[in-house]
Image (cartoon, rainbow, N blue to C red):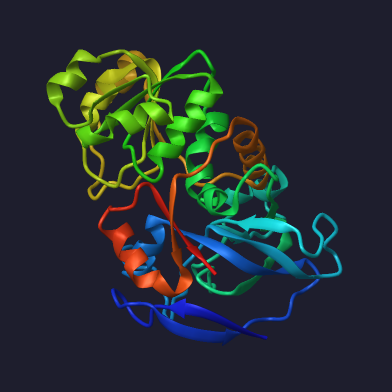
Amino acid sequence: MKIDCYAAQSAKKPLEKFNYSSRDPGSWDVEVKISHCGICHSDAHLVDNDWGISQYPLVPGHEIVGTVSTMGTSVKHLKAGQRVGIGWQCSSCMSCEWCISGKENLCPEIGGTCLGNYGGFANSIVVDSRFAFALPHGLESENAAPLLCGGITVFAPLIHFDIRPAMKVGVIGVGGLGHLALQFYKAWGCEVTAFSATPGKEKEAKGFGASRVFSSRDPEVLKSKAATQDFIISTVPVDLDWESYLNVLRPEGKLCMVGVPHSAITIPAFPLIAARKTVCGSPIGSRGDIETMLAFAARHGIEAQTETFAMSEVNPAMDRVRNNQARYRIVLKN
């Protein structure tokens, strides 16, 4: 079966039309006809080989929405014509301690939808059905696509770090991840503060759920907010004064990294010891986390603010992501 798609033939090159012969769906597989695919900043990193792990030709795309066209014999939870979403992960071993405990996203044999496989900048894709998620009717496809990676990345910490509704939460960055975090954390019941380097985003940040907005780089502002937050999630890929953010945390507070800074993080030990503070990280969520996130988003009207481009406009769309011009996610449409 031939699949038409867009691929990078080498690092930092424009994507070109490409096709490949896909495997026939196995017993647990589904073929999904793709209608939408979000562009995550990770796609740009993979195309440009910023992480040194890319293999070419590379077909990006891991925020996929489409309809099931073919199913394997073991697939019982989906049906032909059903709308589904596919995120960063497309497989796991299903037998290790992490998979058995429902933490497939921590499996040592995790399969990436567009890392080692051809991704969603395409007209269709064949994947393990256990990593294809039925989308609630209340979520529009172009707004739901970014939830499959960006959304679950900021939602999973709510569950795994025991964030309670009465807590005060800070979100660093009002961008592709941050604008979703503000919505999720507000709907969770938290008092949410946004930290942004872009003053012009204050009105929008408050519209997404922030009670207040402060500069993410002003040392005097950060100093004045000492011991005010129970949890801070950093969604930005930049270097900041992390010691100042530790001071913004209350005792037993957590600083959670989901964006990857350019440089190694240097943290003094004393604030961690004296006030039992934690620096942690979080990847995507498990299958159960994604199901919960999608239901929660549909119930509370949480959606990505998107710009839509035709799949054929993939290169200008990618450039907008690279140049941080998207407000706030870009989605390709077939």
User: Which residue sits at x=31%, y=43%?
Assistant: 236
Is 127 located above or below residue 296 in the figure?
below
User: Which residue sits at x=25%, y=14%?
Assistant: 226
> Is any part of residue 28 visible from this angle?
yes
User: Percent x, y for residue 262?
Assistant: 24, 50
Check the picture and name the quadrant holding the N terminus. Answer: bottom right
Q: In the shown orientation, is residue 228 left or right of residue 130?
A: left
Quarter residue 16 falls in: bottom left
Front residue of 73/148: it is: 148
Quarter residue 23 falls in: bottom right
Check the picture and name the quadrant holding the C terminus. Answer: bottom right
User: Percent x, y for residue 222?
Assistant: 20, 21
User: Percent x, y for residue 126?
Assistant: 66, 72
User: Which residue sits at x=47%, y=74%?
Assistant: 59
Label total for image: 0
Is 308 located above or below residue 274 in the figure?
below
Q: In the shown orientation, is residue 227 left or right of residue 3?
A: left
User: Which residue sits at x=52%, y=62%?
Assistant: 37
Is 278 located above or below residue 22 in the figure?
above
Quarter residue 81 falls in: bottom right
> Is any part of residue 132 visible from this angle?
no
Q: In the shown orientation, is residue 182 left or right of residue 156?
A: left
User: Percent x, y for residue 158?
Assistant: 53, 30
Front residue of 244/129: it is: 129
